[in-house]
Amino acid sequence: MTSRLTSPSRAAAAALLALALGVAGPVAAQNRGVLLPDFTELYDRQAPAVVSIDVTQKIRASRGMPELSEDDPFYEFFRRFGQIPRPRGAPERDAQSVGSGFIISSDGYLITNAHVVDGADEVKINLADRREFKAKVVGADKRTDVALLKIEAKDLPKVTIGDPEKLKVGEWVVAIGKPFGLENTMTAGIVSAKGRDLPQENLVPYIQTDVAINPGNSGGPLFNLRGEVVGINSMIFSRSGGYMGLAFAIPIDIAINVANQIKDKGRVTRGRIGVQIQEVSKETAEAFGLSKPAGALVNSVEKGGPADKAGVESGDIIVKVDGRDVKNSAELPRIITAVRPGSKVMLTVWRKGASREIGVTVAEMKEEAPPAQRRGAAPKEKAKPNRMGLILSDLSDEQKRELDVKHGVLIEDIAGGVRGNVQAGDVILAIVNRGQSTDVRSAEQLNAVLAKLEKGASVTLRLKRGEQEFFSTLRINNGE
């Protein structure tokens, strides 16, 4: 005989089960409320201010090589290196990419990542209400990966800006964006770390999260549970190309500062004081008489620079700037670069077992020169274009270290008529001819190889541009 539990019986059974598990009913309910926050209201309020970004870029097709089919054994090889040979005479093609962004003012200003709109010929903004607008790129700052866009619209929903300094590790955060082209997607996680230093990204103290971030989320907002934007989702650590549990966001205060400068001045200015620094280890702190490892140890002072004029010396440890603690050496450039050039800051330095105050007038950091103009490039008369129309120069040892290459030649400039994916600043690593790849170690060596080729012959180069390596095919365009 079977019987159905009445309501009191069910309650009694639930109580017995809770006691058996060692958890009281009300406590269990309370824990469920803490561990499983409800994001529905946040999404309803904030999603309208998040936008999808479609970017179109015209790509010049490579010429001089036969078309490869997907069945060709070399097709996958070229695809992995970023360039599949196109048939001779192939026209320009449109490359499409997607990203995310968010509205910061009701009159149409938006923020996204600089890499989302880099090289864009057209930027289209899709609002949550399905309206579409063409956007103007007001400006972009690659050093922080922040771009400011503008659309012609009024009375738009906008985000609320939060304070990333108040974020705590373990706090819930959510992202809204367009991963893999899927608009208005929300993902959630926690803050995994703050002030994260990443290689070659020393101006941004990244917020690390375990929020699921994938291609297309770039430029989208990171919200705290109050619905405030605390960061811009910028990059992930991945060996697969997709989410692996490590995502990084630019703190929103840094992004807003960059956006305001772009809007007001059309460019971003940064401060500098002219010192070379290093980390203060536990052993260093003990040797200098500091109670704990903190601050930035000055290795050298630029002669005639702001710090030199103010009296900063090699061996000083900068522990504070305007009363703000310098917890480690990575914090000093972030603090100084955020200072308006011409302003005066008060450095607290540790020297010979005692602290002292030094006032320094901050100068403006100049934008980094193109590779050919960096320190270490020997001054010489500009070379003539070679048979491919490229003006080349040999790399100095310092340039090789900066570019992280063991060999190669720099493309200083390009003469008219050159067709192919190549631009000034690229480094030629190797030349591929008749199935043989030869490392390029000097401009003279490369030009000697080209001299042996017939006019109209094609040659494939292995190039490095930034962190990317790829192949590009050019044609010998003269018979000299």
Image (spheres, grey):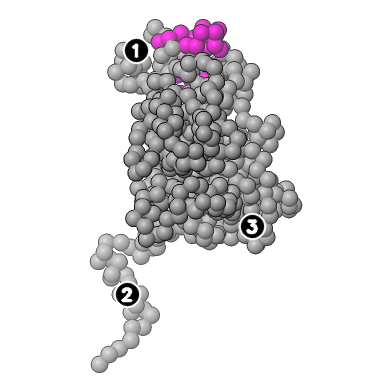
Circle 2: element type:
helix
Query: Nearer the observer, disc 1 or disc 2?
Result: 1
Up the image or down, 194 lies above or below 84; here it is above
Q: Earlier in the sequence, mark 3 or mark 1?
A: 3
User: Which residue is rendered at x = 55% and y = 59% of the image?
Assistant: 184
Q: Which residues are magenta?
A: 301-326
Q: Is residue 311 magenta?
A: yes
Dots 1, 2 in contact, CB < 8 A: no
Q: At 54% from the left edge and 17% from the top edge, which residue is drawn?
A: 381
Residue identified by numbered label 3: 127
Q: Is residue 361 left or right of residue 169?
A: right
Of 251 and 367, which appears nearest the observer? 367
Q: Hey, which quadrant is residue 478 in on the image?
A: top right
Q: Secondary structure at mark 1?
A: loop
Find the distance from the CA under tag 2 to the CA under tag 3: 52 Å
Residue position for label 2: 12
Q: Do the numbered discs 3 and 1 sit on residues whose CB atoms are within 8 Å? A: no
Residue 45: say if magenta.
Answer: no
Q: To which residue does mark 1 refer?
A: 289
Q: Which residue lies at the image location 37% right of the left edge and 47% below the top edge? A: 238
Which residue is more in the foreground, 389 or 33? Answer: 389
Q: Amino acid at mark 1?
A: Gly
Q: CA distance from mark 1 to mark 2?
A: 67 Å
Q: Nearer the viewer, mark 2 or mark 3?
A: 3
Q: Position of residue 438 (x, y in %)?
A: 35, 35
Mark earlier in primary sequence (2, 3): 2
